[in-house]
Image: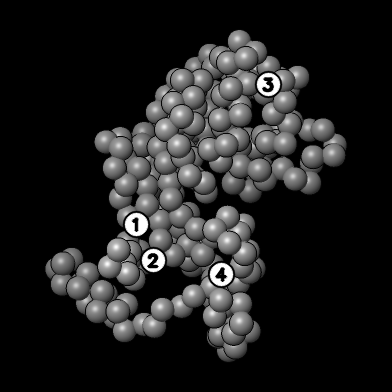
Amino acid sequence: DCAACARKIDRALRRLPVLTKDIIRKEGERMIASDQASYRPGKASTTGSTGRPLSFLLDQQTREVELAAVWRHYLGCGASGLDARIASFRGDFVSERERGALWRWDGRVGELTFNTYALGRDNIRKIIGRLNRFRPEIVRGYPHSLYVLSRGMEAAGARMEASPRFVHTSSEQLPGSMREAIESAMGCPVRDWYSQSEYVISAWECSEGRYHQNMETGAIGLLEDD
């Protein structure tokens, strides 16, 4: 009975005290499990977009659950399979910035990763040319990176020869103006994703424009009446 299971989980979660980032910063070392090695933890951190950055340990199982949820989103939005061709614009290219590379193949995750620090006017046509040769099913990235790319395409008169199935945005707010510019340039819908570095709560946007919470790692609750 899924409903009974959900109620049981909800009751268990309500017994947990509220854990704030300030508590983690102050007591983080004391909160690490004595058997942490069995969870294969790795260091993680937030960007500080809602305040000060936060560093912590994240167990491997949580990473795998989050990745599975992301792929559930991809497949639900029309990806052909786990080998779908993905182009990424997520700012993961910092180490290549000084060498001037515009893209690289990331074999760890099977993605063509583009240098979001090199989206200037002189590079837009080269980047779109590489995108057109790659013909990605999915383009994913930070909203502001994809917005800069989209506006650059418009200014340069560059276009996608074959539209992706969808664009996957995450990690930032997505204003309507950005969504419209990205959809116009890419010729496909944007499907947004909400999450955080802690991988506690995540939600995905379906084709109806509604957000659906992934229930495997957390449940949303309101701490204040307003």
Q: Which residue is mark 3?
A: 124
In the image, taking residue 37 as reference, residue 184 lies left or right, namely left
What quarter of the picture does the N terminus occupy?
bottom left
Q: Residues within 10 Å of mark 1 (few under 14, many from 20)?
A: many
Mark 1 touches mark 2? (CB < 8 Å): yes
CA gap, disc 3 to disc 2?
39 Å
In percent of width and height, residue 51 lies at 58, 62
CA gap, disc 4 to disc 1?
18 Å
In percent of width and height, residue 214 lies at 34, 57
| In this view, the mark in front (3 or 1) | 3
CA gap, disc 1 to disc 2?
7 Å
Q: Amino acid at mark 3?
A: Ile
Q: Earlier in the sequence, mark 3 or mark 2?
A: 3
In this rendering, the answer to whether 83 lies above or below 35 is above
In this rendering, the answer to whether 186 lies above or below 86 is above
Furthest toward the top, the residue is: 157
| In this view, the mark in front (3 or 4) | 3
Q: Residue at x 61, y 29 (%)?
A: 148
Q: Nearer the viewer, residue 39 or 103?
A: 103
Disc 3, SS: helix
Q: Residue at x 67, y 45 (%)?
A: 92
In the image, taking residue 5 as reference, residue 206 lies left or right, namely right
Q: Amino acid at mark 4?
A: Leu
Q: Earlier in the sequence, mark 4 or mark 1?
A: 4
Q: Residues within 10 Å of mark 4 (few under 14, many from 20)?
A: some
Mark 3 touches mark 2? (CB < 8 Å): no
Query: Can residue 164 be seen in this snapshot?
Result: no
- Where on the picture, by quarter, is residue 56? bottom right
Q: Residue 214: which numbered mark, if any?
A: 1
